[in-house]
């Protein structure tokens, strides 16, 4: 078993702003595994909100990846379970898990989504995230947005009401908002009537993750918005903790550590009657294709970072009436972009082996 890992930089079309940060590029890692003459690739991004660094992710994959995968992939379920339970950074588990799923499809000579029994076009329309900007800039983004099913708007304070009202005036599409833990109870209470007037569908993570009493107070209001936990939902235990605090959870491979681990989180949420939104960080189409394998377990889809990238390193996803269309290449369905190196041969090399 051969494992290689490298860093790749994703450059955005414009600077993206939330209540927490602003950036115009981000780095992820690409893990490549080789076994039996077949190569597979997966993408991993650090759990930034929990202090992970890309250096830690790359180091874990390079140092331990081959050992975790084992000598062969004859029992993929066992291998994926080992990866999911590996005591490593979330991004490292995500990258290896993705590489195994890519390898499975490439070995079979068909897209992995077909092995999962998925339709090529996802059933749920995807959302499209709009960062914090001026009213004029926001309206320009909306005017040039792809044909998506909903808008998710990042918000920070009461000043964002003007932006929301401006967008509502030009579209009937559902609007969701995401405060990224920026609000107090008073802010949420005071803004909720105006948000309801604007037909805002839901709010993601209005309060800090540890503000349990604040979530309970808001939930007790007679008229409130549905609340989805994002930063506060990373694993099965946190899903159980969300019951009684929120109406749904936002799941991401970059929080839970890959397809196998995230599936467990989604299944737990559904058992508890929580709605599930499948989302992403700023990732390439490789990682988004990994996430798309879980689409049947989601009530809502927010797979949209491919629309934000300049010169993406992988291509293959399409869009049809707001719904993601998966790539049809063997494996995860995507191919390297013109600026990215091709997938290497799976033969022996100088990388870590077991």
Image (cartoon, grey):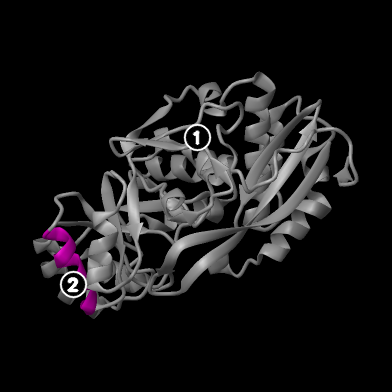
Element under disc 1: loop
Residue lying at the far front in this picture: please name it. Answer: 338
Residue at the disc numbered 1 = 293
Residue 36 falls within the magenta-colored stretch: no
Report the label total. 2
Q: Compute the Cα span from label 2 to label 1.
A: 36 Å
Quarter location, residue 195: bottom left
Residue at the disc numbered 2 = 161
Label disc, if present, on residue 62 of the rendered structure: none
Residue in view at x 30 percent, y 39 percent: 322
Q: Residue 83 location, x and y as percent?
A: 69, 43
Stretch in magenta: 158-169
Identify the image quadrant of the N terminus. Answer: top right
Identify the image quadrant of the C terminus. Answer: top right
**CB within 8 Å, label 2 to label 1:** no
Q: Residue 28 location, x and y as percent?
A: 62, 57
Tell me if residue 88 can be seen.
Answer: yes
From the viewer's perspective, is residue 13 above or below residue 304? Answer: below
Q: Residue 295 location, x and y as percent?
A: 42, 36
């Amino acid at each position: 078993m051969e494992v290689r890992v490298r860093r790749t930089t994703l450059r955005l079309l414009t600077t993206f702003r939330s209540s927490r940060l602003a950036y115009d590029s981000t780095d992820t890692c690409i893990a490549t595994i080789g076994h039996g003459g077949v190569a597979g690739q997966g993408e991993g991004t650090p759990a930034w909100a929990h202090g992970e660094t890309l250096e830690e992710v790359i180091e874990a994959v390079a140092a331990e990846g081959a050992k975790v995968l084992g000598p062969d992939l004859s029992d993929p379920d066992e291998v994926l379970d080992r990866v999911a339970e590996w005591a490593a950074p979330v991004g490292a588990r995500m990258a290896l898990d993705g590489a195994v799923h890519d390898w499975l499809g490439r070995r079979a000579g068909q897209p992995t989504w077909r092995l999962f029994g998925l339709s090529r076009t996802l059933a749920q329309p995807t959302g499209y995230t709009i960062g914090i900007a001026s009213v004029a800039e926001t309206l320009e983004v909306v005017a040039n947005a792809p044909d998506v099913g909903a808008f998710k708007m990042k918000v920070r304070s009461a000043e964002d009401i003007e932006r929301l009202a401006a967008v509502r005036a030009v579209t009937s599409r559902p609007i969701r908002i995401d405060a990224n833990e920026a609000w107090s109870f008073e802010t949420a209470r005071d803004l909720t009537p105006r948000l309801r007037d604007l037909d805002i569908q839901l709010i993601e993570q209005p309060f800090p993750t540890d503000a349990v009493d604040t979530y309970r107070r808001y939930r007790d209001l007679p008229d409130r918005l549905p609340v989805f936990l994002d930063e506060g939902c990373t694993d099965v235990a946190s899903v159980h903790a969300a019951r009684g605090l929120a109406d749904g959870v936002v799941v991401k491979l970059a929080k839970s550590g890959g397809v196998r681990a995230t599936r467990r989180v989604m299944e737990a949420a559904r058992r508890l009657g929580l709605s599930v939104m499948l989302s992403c960080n700023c990732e390439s189409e490789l990682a988004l294709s990994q996430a798309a394998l879980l689409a049947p377990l989601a009530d809502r889809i927010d797979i949209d970072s491919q629309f934000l990238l300049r010169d993406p390193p992988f291509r293959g996803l399409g869009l049809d009436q707001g719904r993601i269309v998966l790539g049809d290449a063997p494996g995860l369905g995507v191919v390297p972009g013109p600026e990215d190196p091709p997938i290497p041969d799976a033969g022996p090399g100088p990388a870590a082996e077991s």
